[in-house]
Amino acid sequence: MALRVATPLRGGSRSSGIRRGERTAGWLFSLPVIVILGVFLFIPVVMAIWVSFSDWSGRGSPVSSGVNFIGVENYTDVTSGGGLAEKNFGTAIRNNAWYVVFVVPIQTVLSLFLAVLVNRAVLRGRSFFRMSFYFPSVTSSVAITVLWLFLFSTSGVINNVLSWFGVNGPNWFNDPRGIVHVALGSMGVGTAPEALSSHGFLGIDWWEWLSGPSFAMSAFILMAVFTTSGTFMLLFLAALQNINPELGEAASMDGANGRQRFWRITLPQLRPTLFTVLTLGLIGTWQVFDQIYTGTQGGPGKTTLTPAYLSYESAFIGQEWGRGSAIAFILFIIIIVFTVFQRWVLRERAVSKRRSYNYQATGKKS
Amino acid sequence: MSAIETRPQAARQQDDLKRSTVWRRRLKSLGIGQWVLFALLIALALIYIYPFLVQIATSFKTDSEAASNPISLVPSIWSWAAYEQLFARSDFPRWFMNSAIVTIFVTTGRVFFVSLAGYALARLHFRGRGLVFAMVVGVMAVPGVVLLIPKFLVLNQLNLYDSYLGMILPLLVDAAGVFIMKNFFESIPVSVEEQARMDGAGAFRVFWSIVLPMARPALITIVILSFQGSWNELSHFIVSTQSPDLTTLTKGVASLASGQLSQGSQYPIKLAASVIMTIPVAVMFFVFQRRIMNNTQGAEKG
């Protein structure tokens, strides 16, 4: 800092020469990044926005004269068209929403649990546990999906283990029944109440919305938890190691038990990490694509169809490029809305007088 | 970190002493608790590791044994049939080669371009720097699946569809990498470079022979991230290629999984393929495991 201030004193012409060189170098150094991000990210997004408002059929260039602007038709087709497009989109949103509802809380709680356990272990082997929990996160989603198809096959490992407990496992990846429907069915609610089946949203009725994830989707839910909990565990572990141990010690001397120490002392200090994990979780779980492409292609009974896969399928297989792009942008908006909403819910609230007094008191101790 | 190290020796020793008595007290009071915890951790670790052991074991089983006894970790008859078929009678070697080509180019390119841009954004003063940085951050916020159709559109427009160039170029720059390098360069002291620059060295000289060698830890991070990222990449290759000659491991094994190339379930072959595609990443993981664990901590702090 001091040196930078000192340079102008050495004579105007020379220092401005250095600065001028820096200007050129700065642009030259960033040029590859700017060009590649520009050509392969910005221009494509602009092109896709155009395609989502056009009737391009996949032949020729989307910016040629034969392609027409058709307004928001591609968007209204999937949100209120009343046809198959709307039904597929509604189904995809339902499937993905259940996926998010299950994966985000489970992976957050499990990764925090693993981090606390690993952090508490005084005995040797801490790094061994850390590695075993993290390893699934570095492997490819394709390899894990292949493994999962085997583990959850009809007479596979999972059903074998279940049979030890007398449970007759389902035909996982071929079973389109929603688990909430199955649970309700076992309690005697086998058919839809009139109120739920006569109304709906996005082309499917409320009873269908409440089906829960299918058994096939449940297997993917377990897979997501298996592959992401390690990453998030590392984040929590890092945060736990930065926590001042004296606070916990002081609390335990004041008679706080383990549970109180965790909820009142440890957890509040993990808040920023919790925030990160939930944000990353929400963003990631709305982008389910690789598993579906590798494993089920949306089946059975469209119960593993997700917006990301539907967007790909509409465009690349169905040649409905406008519709595919429209679905992608709706998905983009969903992700933004959820992230903003979650940030708003977990925002830093103004601290009340009594609590801020407590904070000061604890602050003095350390 | 550095704050701790600059404290006097005595204070540090006292700290260590305090910590060790705390541990000893905990050990004594939680004697049984620790063992329960240990047992729980072992059970959990088994759940996380067992699937991979099954994967390896099954790849050496015969088709019928894989179906009849999926759970055992020792094949009753060791069979190399799956691997033989993969390497001798399928396109698998080609897929492996394509993945290797892409990974090598992407990793080398990324390390270079990302550190160049990171250095410029951290150190060089030029008009528009704020704008470039805003662009990089903005790009990080765009979810990957939204880009599937857009990427295809632009590759098609530029006649890069179905070529190595189209597979490699879009992956060559990673916004998160620029971000990591920028943060790293900002953390090393300016004085060394200033000295060299006053001696008349140009910006590239300073970057190449002074700053870059100091950035080794951050560069290894970039290597790990790009290696893992491009080796495991699937969606980009789905939208950028079509020809069987350009199929990568991820795309090829995905087609194996959905049964396009095989009859029946044939789990040993599929699992053998997934074992082999996991090996390079696993090797990298074990070589750099300490660094990977620490990196994630650093990322969180930053």
Image (spheres, grey):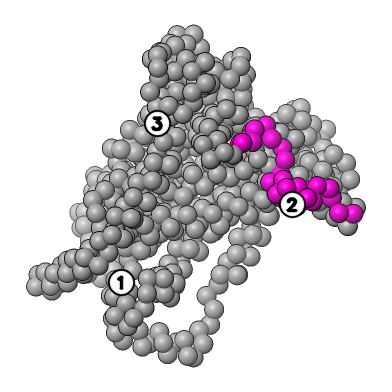
- Which residue range is magenta in the image? A168-194
Mark 2 crowdedness (10 Å alpha carbons): few <14, some 14-19, many ≥20: few
Q: Chain of mark 3?
A: B
The structure residue drawn at horizontal position 43% and vertical position 48%, both measured from the top left corner, is: A230
The residue indicated by pointer 2 is: A187
| Residue B251 in sight here | no
Secondary structure at numbered mark 3: helix
Circle 2 marks a residue in which chain?
A
- On residue A244, which mark appears? 1
Indicate left or right for A335 with B8 as reference.
Answer: right
Seen from the viewer's position, the closer of residues B26 and A135 is B26
Q: Are marks 3 and 1 in contact (CB under 8 Å)?
A: no
Disc assigned to residue B53:
3
User: Of residues B162 and B260, which is closer to you in this image?
Assistant: B260
Work out whether B138 lies above or below B156: below
Check residue B54 in the rendering and tell me which mark sits there, or answer none.
none
Q: Residue furthest left?
A: B10
Amino acid marked by disc 2: Met
Considering only vertical position in the picture, is B214 above or below A259? above
Q: Residue at x 33, y 36 (%)?
A: B284
Q: Quadrant of the N terminus of chain B?
A: bottom left
x, y percent for residue B232: 47, 34
Horizontal placement of B153 versus B93: left or right? Answer: right
Q: Is residue A94 magenta?
A: no
How packed is label 1: few (under 14 Cα within 10 Å), some, or many (20 or more)? few
Nearer to us of marks 2 and 1 is: 2
Quadrant housing residue B126 = bottom left
Give x and y (percent) for residue A74: 81, 44
Judged by depth in the image, the label closer to the viewer, 2 or 3, is: 2
Tell me where residue B73 appears, x and y as whole percent: 39, 27
